Amino acid sequence: MSTSMLPSRSKTSVLVFLIPPLLLYGVAVLLPILQSLFLSFFDWDGITSLRFVGFDNYARMFVGDDVFWTAFSNSLGYLAICLILQLGGALVVASLLISLRRGREVVKTLYLLPAVISTVAIAFLFQRIYSLEPVGLLNQLLAWVGLEGLQQAWLSDVDTVLAAVSIPEGWRFTGLYMLIIYAALLAVPQELEEAARLDGANWWQVFTKIRFPYIRPVWITTTIMASTYALRGFDIPYLLTNGGPGQASELLTTYMYKTAFTHTDYGYASTISVFIVVECLIAVGLIILLLRRKADA
Amino acid sequence: MTHIRIRAAAVAAAASVALVLSGCSGGAPAATGEIDPEGEIQPREISWLLSRPADGGVITAMQQIADEYAEEHPGFSLNLITTPDRPSYIQKYETLAAANKLPELFDTDATPFAKKLADQGRMIDAEALLKDLDLYDDYRPAALNYQRFDDGSLYMIPFEFQLEFFWYNTALFEEAGVEVPESLDDFPAMCEALRASGVTPIALDGQDQWPLERYMAYHPFRTAGPEYVQELKRGDAAFADPDGEAAVEWLHSLGEAGCFAEGFSSTGYADAQALFTSGKAAVYNIGTWELANLATENLDAGVRDDIDYFTLPMTPDAVTAENEYVTPSGIGMAVSAKTFDPLVRDFLAFALERYPEVYATTGALSPTSNVETTIPDNATPLYQRAVEQADGVGEKIAMPWDTQLDPASNTRLQQELTLLVQGEITPDEFIETMDATIARNGPAAFE
């Protein structure tokens, strides 16, 4: 290990630099999670005293609450759409970018732009895009290509609303992941690719046998980032539809927020947040397991 | 693993921690609830956490009054902290209440949460205070009644008085060959005729949920009176009862008749109003707080002469009178018991005495009946009529349900209502879901 080669004085300095962020992390992340765990065993409205209820909140969540399960499956749908757009989109754009000879910087900037726009602005933007009355951009485009029949109020239809609230989130961060993957692709040694091509490898073989294995570590990191971001996605669905119509775009996060701050049911909201924490940990575990196993195979 | 940051969970959890740390005691603060505390008036800054439009009449009037008071009491100032968006405001206020950090004055409706605060002695008894200040009799009884809890106690002071009307476009009605509906049951036929003539029958701000919830309140208010929702919220009445069922069927029929714009659930407040004021929608249900936009020259000249209004129609067997409908006095102002001292009392005595006069000059209806509203110069004749209508309202008030139900049932009701009107669920499914939801949450909230 390289650290063992450091003189002891450096070890101290490493500690000095590592402990403050660790403490901060403990106070800002771990402590609240433990507090949520604690609160999840209580019934509490914020103004009267805590009442211990044991596992009642968990029982209610798993068997007595239909909205919870709707929100959970919506969250998975949201995750899937975000991942396809963010990772799939990012990989495609990054691969195209590599083959671009000129104007790379412009394309990169354009793709990254949405990531720096404020969420509220994006929500307003998409509200207009999806609007039917007055006719928004999407419905207008459909009319121009002669598909008036497909025109609809995308945010009011229970069948389209989940996709409609997921797409802005996916679109927004595609550029960010594209940049990371692009950087990784740049590091793929050109000699290897050229040698493979000389041996008669086609584009697909170059990609699957050389490029992708090379960027796998970066791919794991981006997948973890995108998944955890999507699992705790909140702002755009909250701003666009507030979970509606009905519970058609309710995510676990928006449901937890409403339970806590609208229903003042802090105990049950903590139970849902504990579930979100566990869900994120499981997701990350699965990703690492799957991608590592593939690498070993 | 340190890369994993579960921020959404953490943010909520952090908020919970803040609550735990600051509000763990949970109990009532040491307040006497004395309405005439002893001691000297020591000017300082006091705060009012409120949920009203930043440039609206209430804030403008109170700011002016506070400035006048400060002239005689150097060192005094009134810090107005407004969050006009109601759901955001409620979250803010409830979180501050949980942290025991409510300021001297704060806005609240007569909700179950506010009742808990009152029961814990954290709010000053407004009826006792107003009587002690000799102002109680100035108030319109309807304005005070709107603020009362179900047991009749009064902890909030009204600052407005509003009447909610159905505004309609006479030209569009004529074109479609429809009359002003006499009964709520005439609504579906009215909508169908208007649809057939190519206009949106009713403009509705579906995004904010409460406008559609008003429609839920109308039918049972006519057929069963204001008691229906009071019983319903406790689980003592049900949607499965004949009155409830009739209301649900009525709403379903509004949806089927295409009363609201397609995609109404994502239409915002301004967009809904624009549909009406641009002549694209025939009916718009809103209160007198919009008089400045609907009954003055601010209104688009193209529709200005065609706008009129009617009040909540009856039902054939109505138990409430024609002059009884939604007449809210707005969100009320509560006085925190913890920080109530001679200064707060003295300022309120000065402000509440002065308020009606200052407020009425802005063209708004005062919650008291001792002043006359100034009609703006650019008003249309409708303005005067609406203002006069205020003196003729009856005793019973159709309470907005969002201030009545417990929050969990209310959220679910708003969601299911959208689905019902969009035709995604049947009336029976709606009744089953809502009765189960209220049975689970209602009795516990009002025990």
Image (spheres, coloured by chain):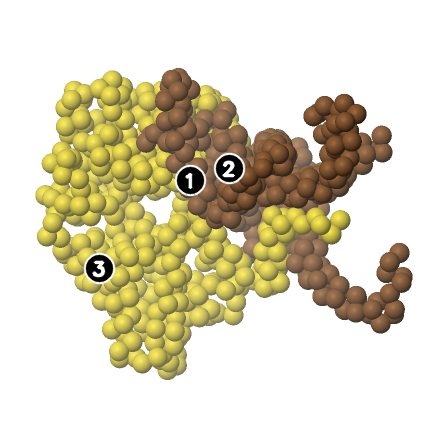
For label 2, count other residues whose C-alpha is less than 10 Å away and answer few (under 14), some (14-19) or many (20+): many
Q: Is residue B269 visible?
A: yes
What residue is rendered at 22% in x and 67% in y?
Answer: B354
Residue under numbered circle 1 = A125
Q: Chain of mark 1?
A: A
Residue A229 x/y as whole percent: 62, 43
* Mark 2 vs mark 3, CA separation in Å: 44 Å
Q: Which mark is residue B359?
A: 3
Task: Give the residue at mark 2.
Answer: A168
From the viewer's perspective, tell me whether residue B129 is left or right of residue B425: left
- Residue B105 lies, in percent from the top left, at 39, 64
From the viewer's perspective, tell me whether residue B278 is left or right of residue A173. left
The earlier-in-sequence mark between 2 and 1 is: 1
Where residue B151 appears, as percent x and y from the top left, is: 40, 50
Do circles 2 and 3 both sit on a common chain?
A: no
Q: Tell me whether circle 2 and circle 1 mark residues in contact (CB < 8 Å).
A: yes
Q: Is residue B362 above or below residue A100?
A: below
